Amino acid sequence: MSAFAVFAVAAFAASYIGPLGAAIPQASAAETPTVSLFAHSSSDVQSVTISEAVESAAEIERDGYTVFVKPTPTPTPVPVAASVGSTGSSWQPPFVTPNPGSAQAIAFDMVSARGWGNDQYACLVALWKKESGWRVNAYNAGSGAYGIPQALPGSKMASAGADWETNPATQIAWGLGYISARYGSPCGAWDHSTRVGWY
């Protein structure tokens, strides 16, 4: 037998016998109980079962502690009647007071000067929010429409003033004239826009 083989056998025997000089007994699976982390921690969990009768109670007692329970109220739905516009649309936007100095404030004054009420102003706000976001320089590259009222082409607004490209008052004056002539009122234009997609 070679020296290497003798050395390998001696090393194997030493590792099996161990430093104490005796073989380490192997424990069988039946002798060692299996304890999982879940089984160990689940015994520490507190739980409370609340019956329907107790659910309405204001407090629950457990292990010397009192827990106050605030029942969650069930909201009662409030019926909302659909308003019908002057032109038959099923919904009209609500009136909101405009910020002073804004394009919407200018429009509010012009709408009021024409004798139209808050409902007409609310329709105008919704219409031009949809069309241009009330931006004086809103430009639709696809159609060429421009400005707050999205005049097509934008140069049509020159009939209301030479500053039609930058002045919201000029654009609004032109837009209200257009709406009045074609639809009768802002709510008429809004109704057409909601049905067709444009005005």
Image: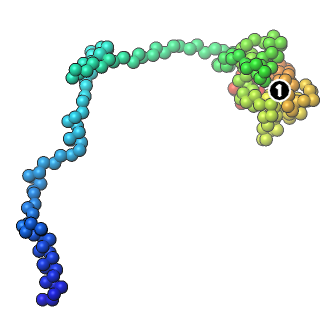
Residue drawn at 75 percent across, 11 percent down: 117
Residue 67, image quadrant: top left
Q: Position of residue 69 (x, y in %)?
A: 33, 18
Left or right of residue 157, residue 47 in this image: left
Q: Secondary structure at mark 1?
A: helix
Q: Position of residue 11 (x, y in %)?
A: 15, 76
Q: Position of residue 155 (x, y in %)?
A: 89, 33
* Residue at the spot of label 1: 168
The amino acid type, in three-letter code, at marker 1 is Pro
Colouring: rainbow
Q: Quadrant of the image for the N terminus? A: bottom left
Residue drawn at 6 percent across, 67 percent down: 22
Residue drawn at 81 percent across, 10 percent down: 115
Asked whether 70 or 119 is in front, the reply is: 70
Question: What is the crowding at mark 1: few (fewer than 14 residues within 10 Å), some, or many (at least 20)?
Answer: many
Residue drawn at 83 percent across, 13 percent down: 114
